[in-house]
Image (cartoon, grey):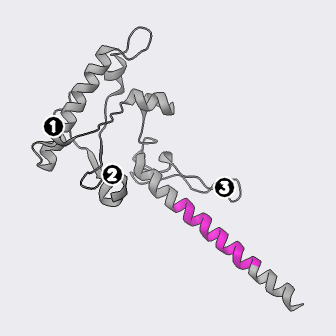
């Protein structure tokens, strides 16, 4: 059953962005992002009659945010983690649905089927010549798919441009020889 009790999370993902790019925060500080699967239905049930996010929504969001911090505190062994948080930004499935219009606030992309496998993906190439695509819908979903597909699409485009450059140089040399 889907619940809104996240005191015990089956899994979560944490990324310490400041380890990769120290310039993303002030010296001595860290930027940590974490995510986990949340129930769209649990949040949708808290909406006001007119669809606004009222006190029930914010109470649920605050409670889950607190549970997530407690989970991360246990996972990292930093008992007083909550005391070190200066800024926190929390998005719910309704947040993703509002800004992306993704069904049920999906942030992970298409549902992988057993036939596809967890790491199947759609092609970065399109039927349109020299048009490449990248994004969360091209792999296992989420930020990781965006990063990986962005790198891959840019590498394909770079190889194409390098090929064009070599062909152009060859044409210039042929013209110069004549």
Mark 2 burial class by Cα count in 10 Å: few <14, some 14-19, many 20+: few
Where residue 67 sits: x, y (%)? Answer: 19, 32
**Toward which corner of the image does residue 162 lie, by quadrant?**
bottom right
Where residue 76 sits: x, y (%)? Answer: 15, 49
Residue 161 drawn in magenta: yes
Judged from the image, the secondary structure of the residue bearing numbered disc 3 is: loop
- Total marks placed: 3
Where residue 47 sits: x, y (%)? Answer: 37, 15
Q: Earlier in the sequence, mark 3 or mark 2?
A: 2
- Tell me, yes or no, if residue 102 can be seen here: no
Q: Which residue is found at the position 42% from the left and 44% from the top?
A: 113
Q: Which residue is found at the position 49% from the left and 53% from the top?
A: 121
Q: Which residue is found at the position 15% from the left and 39% from the top?
A: 83
Q: Earlier in the sequence, mark 3 or mark 1?
A: 1
Where residue 73 sits: x, y (%)? Answer: 15, 43
Specify whether 60 is left or right of 110: left
Image quarter where the C terminus lies is bottom right
> Which residue does the numbered mark 1 point to in the structure image?
70
> Which residue does the numbered mark 2 point to in the structure image?
25
Specify whether 17 is left or right of 3: right
Depth check: 85 or 5 in front? 85
> Which residue does the numbered mark 3 point to in the structure image?
131
Residue 119 drawn in magenta: no
């Amino acid at each position: 059953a889907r619940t809104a009790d996240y005191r015990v999370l089956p899994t979560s993902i944490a990324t310490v962005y400041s380890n990769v790019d120290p310039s993303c925060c002030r010296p001595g500080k860290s930027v940590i992002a974490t995510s986990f699967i949340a129930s769209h239905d649990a949040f949708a049930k808290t909406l006001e009659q007119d669809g606004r996010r009222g006190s029930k929504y914010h109470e649920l969001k605050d409670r889950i945010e607190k549970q997530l911090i407690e989970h991360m505190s246990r996972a990292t062994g930093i008992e007083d983690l909550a005391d070190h948080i200066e800024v926190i930004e929390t998005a719910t499935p309704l947040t993703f649905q509002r800004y992306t219009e993704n069904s049920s606030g999906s942030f992970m992309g298409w549902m992988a089927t057993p036939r596809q496998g967890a790491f199947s993906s759609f092609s970065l190439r399109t039927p349109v010549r020299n048009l490449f695509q990248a994004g969360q819908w091209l792999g296992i979903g989420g930020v990781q798919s965006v990063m990986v597909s962005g790198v891959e699409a840019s590498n394909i485009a770079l190889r194409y441009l390098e090929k064009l450059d070599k062909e152009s140089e060859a044409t210039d040399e042929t013209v110069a020889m004549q």
